[in-house]
Image (cartoon, grey):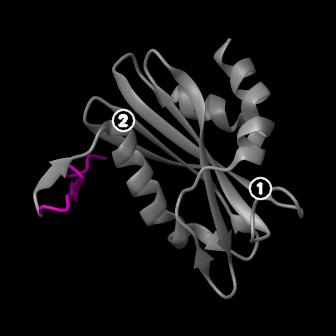
Amino acid sequence: MTTDKLCEETEAGVVAEQSPIEKLRTYFADQLPNHLNAIGVHPHIALVFNDEQLTVLAVDLPPTRLRRAVEDAMYDNATAAVFGMDISCRPNQGTTLADMIALFEWLPGTGWYFGGVIEYQHEPRIVRPLAFNAYWDEAFSGYVSRINS
């Protein structure tokens, strides 16, 4: 599946092209509300840019196998990838809603890293913008180190 170049408008009204990872973040956030249901976000959403071709994956696997499925869709010319992991939150974890998507991002030469959280609620429908979360950044630091080694 290919996509038109995603662009953003600057304050001056000039349209600037986004980087591959920014394109994936934007597309992921735009599509997320369409994938919410009573059990959360299922199947998992993953996106891969191989050159300028966008591959959209709906992954019906446990979270422990999600990253491998994304990597199977990446080729030598991959320029960016993201996947979201659905997580139920508890008090004192830096979120205000009970559910979130942990976004993991990949860039060549950098590898995988934690991109932030998108908090959501199914009913009534609430989807917050991607945001940094110190609790989850620390919680996933070991996971990210393991998958990059």
Q: Which mark is residue 87?
A: 1
Is residue 9 part of the magenta span, yes or no?
A: yes
Residue topped by disc 2: 49
Tag 2's secondary structure? strand
- Mark 2: amino acid: Phe
Is residue 84 part of the magenta span, yes or no?
A: no
Q: Residue at x 27, y 29 (%)?
A: 51
Q: Earlier in the sequence, mark 2 or mark 1?
A: 2
Above or below, 85 relative to 78: below
Of 82 and 118, the residue lying toward us: 118
- Which region of the structure is painted magenta? 1-12
Front of the two marks 2 and 1? 1
Residue 93 position within the rendered picture, expressed as x and y whole percent measured from the top left: 83, 56
Sort mark 1 into few (<14), some (14-19) or many (20+) by Cα contacts within 10 Å: some
Of 65 and 134, the residue lying toward us: 134
Left or right of residue 94: residue 115? left
Q: Residue at x 69, y 85 (%)?
A: 123
